[in-house]
């Protein structure tokens, strides 16, 4: 995962977010490695102790953290900097909207009887509880507009 250099977030903020996800929210996620680039961008990757899938990184024998675990980490980071560019999310608002879209797609696949390996999260979006009702309403409204 990469945090754009324009954000004031640091690798220490990432460590704090991961610890909050693990200790406060019971998520199975651990910082495997990370660094800060010469221009200030933060790059990091995480593993899980009991994940279902391999990470996909050739040198790594660990297990991949779940979508929900990553969601808690990203949500905690957005609590620190709502305008950060984290991964492919351009802001907290974009993150909330994207989560709603993913949840809607999950529900639609369930209705159609379609299952895939990414559905084990079960639409688990409890990490959205870290945001205010106003932010959630705004993200939900944006999701409805962008879907049509």
Image: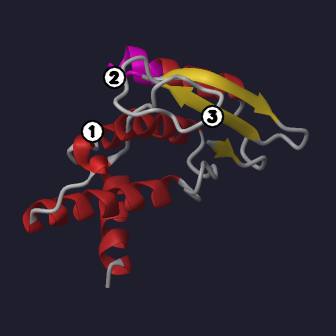
Question: Are circles 3 and 1 on residues that touch, CB within 8 Å?
Answer: no
Locate residue 57, reporting x and y percent.
Answer: 60, 36
Locate residue 25, reporting x and y percent.
Answer: 33, 22
Camera-side mark, 3 or 2: 3
Query: Which region of the structure is painted magenta?
Result: 20-28
Question: Are circles 2 and 1 on residues that touch, CB within 8 Å?
Answer: yes
| Residue 24 within the segment the image draws in magenta | yes
Q: Measured along the vertical axis of the image, is residue 85 above or below residue 59?
A: below
- Nearer to me, 114 or 123: 114
Whether residue 59 sits left or right of residue 113 in the image: it is right
Whether residue 131 sits left or right of residue 61 in the image: it is left
Q: How is the image coloured?
A: secondary structure
Q: Residue at x 30, y 39 (%)?
A: 129
Residue 34 visible here:
yes
Whether residue 10 sits left or right of residue 117 in the image: it is right
Q: In the structure shown, which secondary structural element does the residue marked by tag 3 occupy?
A: loop
Which numbered circle lies on residue 126?
1
Residue 124 visible here:
no
- Nearer to me, 130 or 31: 31
Q: On the image, numbered disc 2 is attached to which residue?
A: 25
- Identify the residue at the far front of this view: 58
Q: Looking at the image, tell me whether mark 3 or mark 2 is earlier in sequence order.
A: 2
Q: Residue at x 46, y 54 (%)?
A: 95
Q: Quadrant of residue 115?
A: bottom left
């Amino acid at each position: 995962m990469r945090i754009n250099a324009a954000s004031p977030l640091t690798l220490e903020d990432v460590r704090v977010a991961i610890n909050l996800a693990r200790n406060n929210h019971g998520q199975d996620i651990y910082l495997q490695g990370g660094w800060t680039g010469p221009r200030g961008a933060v790059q990091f990757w995480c593993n899980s102790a009991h994940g279902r899938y391999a990470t996909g990184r050739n040198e790594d024998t660990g297990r991949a953290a779940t979508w929900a675990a990553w969601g808690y980490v990203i949500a905690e980071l957005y609590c620190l900097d709502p305008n950060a560019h984290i991964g492919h999310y351009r802001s907290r608002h974009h993150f909330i909207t994207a989560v709603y879209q993913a949840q809607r797609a999950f529900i639609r696949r369930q209705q159609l009887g379609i299952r895939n390996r990414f559905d084990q999260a079960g639409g688990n979006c409890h990490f959205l509880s870290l945001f205010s009702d106003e932010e959630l309403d705004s993200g939900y409204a944006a999701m409805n507009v962008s879907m049509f």
